[in-house]
Image (cartoon, rainbow, N blue to C red):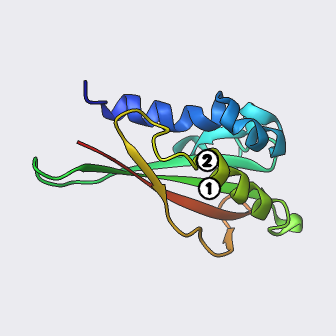
Amino acid sequence: MAPTITTIENSFRDILKISTKGLAVRNALGDGVNSIVRADELTKDTIPPLPCLALRWQSGGGSRSQPLRYYPFWYIYDGLPKFWIRINPIIELILVAYFELDIIPYCETDYRLFSGEITDNTLGLRAKYVPFVVSTR
């Protein structure tokens, strides 16, 4: 049976939140799994212990004959004085966790080049993000 947007999103998130493949990532965060949040819930008042991850999810369109594509982004945040010293190694850990192409059943998961250095003035944090593409039929 073809996966739904909900099962794809949950499977993608759970790779870092509960899978053994995400253990190294959780160990590198400020408070393990508690430092993994949804980006739309992240405000200056709700920042978990740093460094932390925030998942942003975008859906893609397409015709019925084309694969469905989803675009999840893992944002890695850390404090201003830390710059990107702790962020850069976390990027590598994320890429290793998602290395297997068939990590989400019935989907192909691929990642793109990670972002440059970002300063999020709204949150008062440094950041980079890793974009992914999850395709299914």
Q: Can you say whether 27 is above or below 61 in the image? A: above
| Neighbourhood count class around disc 2 (C-alpha, 10 Å): few under 14, some 14–19, many 20 upward | many
Q: Are marks 1 and 2 in contact (CB under 8 Å)?
A: yes
Q: Quadrant of the N terminus?
A: top left
- Labels in figure, total: 2
Of residues 4 and 128, the one nearer the viewer is 4
Of residues 68 and 115, the one nearer the viewer is 68
Kind of residue at disc 1: Tyr
Whether residue 43 is visible to the viewer of this picture, yes or no, is no
Using the rendered view, name the quadrant where residue 91 is placed.
bottom right
Where disc 1 sits, the SS reads strand
Residue drawn 50% across and 38% down?
103
Whether residue 136 is visible to the viewer of this picture, yes or no, is yes
Residue highlighted by disc 2: 54
Residue drawn 21% across and 54% down?
61
Residue highlighted by disc 1: 75
* Residue 123 as seen in the image, left or right of residue 73: right
- Residue 84: x %, y % from top left: 80, 68
Q: Quadrant of the C terminus?
A: top left
